[in-house]
């Protein structure tokens, strides 16, 4: 009798250990399935990536508008996430896809300006153009040399 009691006690001890081990294993598996996983790249994707930094790679026919909105030929619009007025007549638009475009008031027409895929700044000239085309003098310089020409 005494021998039988010790076997039952040993058996219930092992059952409790196995039960705890199963709970830990199921919890660990459940957490790994519920935690966010990295998205895998689509190997059969027909769309090209949007680009990196100031080299956007939007499809041919994509336009940018004066407010920084980019319209693709398929009709989708990409709105800037951040807009920075640089104070020198240029504006930098940052987009969620990691691209950025610098514009000035002379590079983007009200009807939109086409972007060139894969080119720096989408093919736009980011430096402001002087409307009068005159010579700019640097601070502290005199214009006596200009009068002698």
Image (spheres, grey):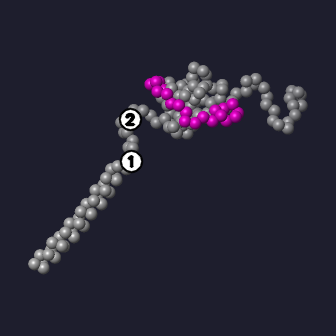
* Relative to 27, 131 lies left or right: right
36 shown above or below 119? below
| Secondary structure state at the residue bearing disc 1 | loop
Q: Specify the segment rendered in magenta.
A: 72-91
Q: Residue furthest top?
A: 111
Quadrant of the snapshot with the N terminus: bottom left
Q: CA distance from mark 1 to mark 2?
A: 22 Å
* Relative to 22, 56 lies left or right: right
Image coordinates of residue 108 in percent, x first then y, are: 61, 25
Q: Residue furthest left?
A: 1
Q: Residue furthest bottom?
A: 2
**Which badge, 1 or 2, is on the more N-terminal residue?**
1
Q: At x 51% / y 37%, what residue is drawn?
A: 96
**Residue 120 visible in the displayed image:** no
Which residue in the protein does label 1 denote? Answer: 36
Quadrant of the snapshot with the C terminus: top right
Q: Nearer the viewer, residue 54 or 22?
A: 22
Q: At x 34% / y 53%, what residue is drawn?
A: 31
Crowd rating for badge 1 (residues with CA inside 10 Å; few <14, some 14–19, many 20+): few
Which residue in the protein does label 2 denote? Answer: 45
Image coordinates of residue 55 in percent, x first then y, are: 55, 36
Do residues under tags 1 and 2 come within 8 Å of each other at their CB atoms?
Answer: no
Q: Nearer the viewer, residue 33 or 53?
A: 33
12 shown above or below 52? below
Image coordinates of residue 107 in percent, x first then y, are: 63, 26
């Amino acid at each position: 009798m005494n021998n039988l009691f010790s076997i039952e006690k040993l058996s219930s001890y092992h059952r409790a250990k196995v039960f705890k081990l199963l709970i830990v294993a199921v919890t660990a598996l459940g957490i790994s399935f519920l935690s966010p996983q990295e998205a895998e790249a689509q190997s059969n994707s027909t769309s090209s990536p949007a680009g990196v930094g100031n080299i956007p790679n939007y499809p041919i026919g994509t336009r940018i508008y004066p407010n920084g909105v980019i319209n693709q030929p398929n009709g989708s619009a990409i709105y800037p996430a951040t807009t920075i007025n640089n104070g020198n007549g240029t504006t930098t638009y940052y987009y969620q896809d990691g691209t950025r475009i610098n514009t000035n008031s002379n590079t983007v027409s009200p009807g939109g300006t086409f972007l060139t895929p894969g080119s720096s700044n989408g093919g736009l000239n980011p430096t402001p153009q002087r409307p009068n085309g005159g010579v700019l003098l640097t601070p502290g310089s005199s214009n006596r040399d200009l009068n002698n020409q």
